[in-house]
Image (cartoon, rainbow, N blue to C red):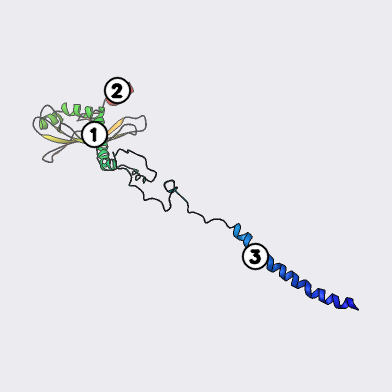
Amino acid sequence: MLLPRIAPTALRLQPQYAHQCLRRMTPLRHAYSTEQASPPTVPWKTPHSITSWPPEPLIPPPKEGEILLERRPNRDLPPLPPLIPTQVKRTFPIFVLVMAASIFAFFNYQKQESSVVTSTLYALRTNPAVREQLGDEIYFASKYPWIRGEINQVHGRIDINFWVKGTRKQGLVRLRCRRRGKTGYFVTQEWSLTLEDGTVMQLYDPEGSAIDPFRGMGTEDAV
């Protein structure tokens, strides 16, 4: 009869004992978590702030041409140089203008010394009508003549005009020629001389009453 009385008593004591064990473990668990806590993290340090925090103020960067007597870890970096220097920006437009003028002068000199222009001048000097109007010593009107137009013997196109002068007057010479086929001869379409008063002299006549400056050029090139 005693066993049934002892059993309920044991059942009542068992949860109390477990509850007391949990109370005793709580401080231990709190102490364990306190010991394992990590120290506060320090913000990321740059080389000049290893020994002190907050970092020391930065020293201004050295000026151009300044001599550094000492190296400080907290010296600020100098500014980055521009991609294109200022001097280049100022002189680049002048460089472009000079190069453009040089290129135009080179091509103009090439046309001036070409066989087309020299043959045209020779034909003017040997033309009696031109000598009667301009006089003797027919040559370019300017010391630095400008040959306007195109001289493209590869594609068979010639269209130029320039000023000439003699001992009496000045005039504007116009020469326009085309080539028949890739291996054909040049055919003169216009060869005229316009005087200062507006008088136009047609120097080329298909009927043969005037001298064609390109009459013998095809034969010479073929030889």
Residue positioned 37% across, 42% down in the render? 72
Q: What element carries label 1?
A: helix
State how far apart marks 2 and 3 are (Cα): 119 Å
In which quadrant of the rendered image does the N terminus lie?
bottom right
Residue 120 in view: yes
Q: Quadrant of residue 172?
A: top left
In which quadrant of the rendered image does the C terminus lie?
top left
Position of 134 with respect to 95 (left or right) is left
Residue 190 in view: no
Residue positioned 85% across, 75% down in the render? 7
Q: Is mark 2 on a helix, strand or loop?
A: helix
Position of 119 with respect to 135 (left or right) is right
Circle 1: residue type? Ala
Position of 169 with respect to 160 (left or right) is left
The mark total stands at: 3
- Outermost residue on the left side: it is 168
Q: Where is residue 12 in the image (x, y as percent from the top left)?
A: 79, 75
Q: Mark 1 points at which residue?
A: 105
Mark nearer the N terminus (1 vs 2): 1
Residue positioned 14% across, 31% down in the render? 130
Q: Where is residue 26 in the image (x, y as percent from the top left)?
A: 66, 66
Q: Is mark 3 on a helix, strand or loop?
A: helix
- Using the image as rendered, state which of residue 103 and residue 160 is in the foreground: 103
Q: Mark 3 points at which residue?
A: 27
Mark nearer the N terminus (2 vs 3): 3
Res 180 label: none
Q: Quadrant of residue 68?
A: top left
Find out whether the residues at labels 3 and 1 contact each other: C-beta distance under 8 Å: no
Q: Name the residue under label 2.
A: 220
Circle 3: residue type? Pro
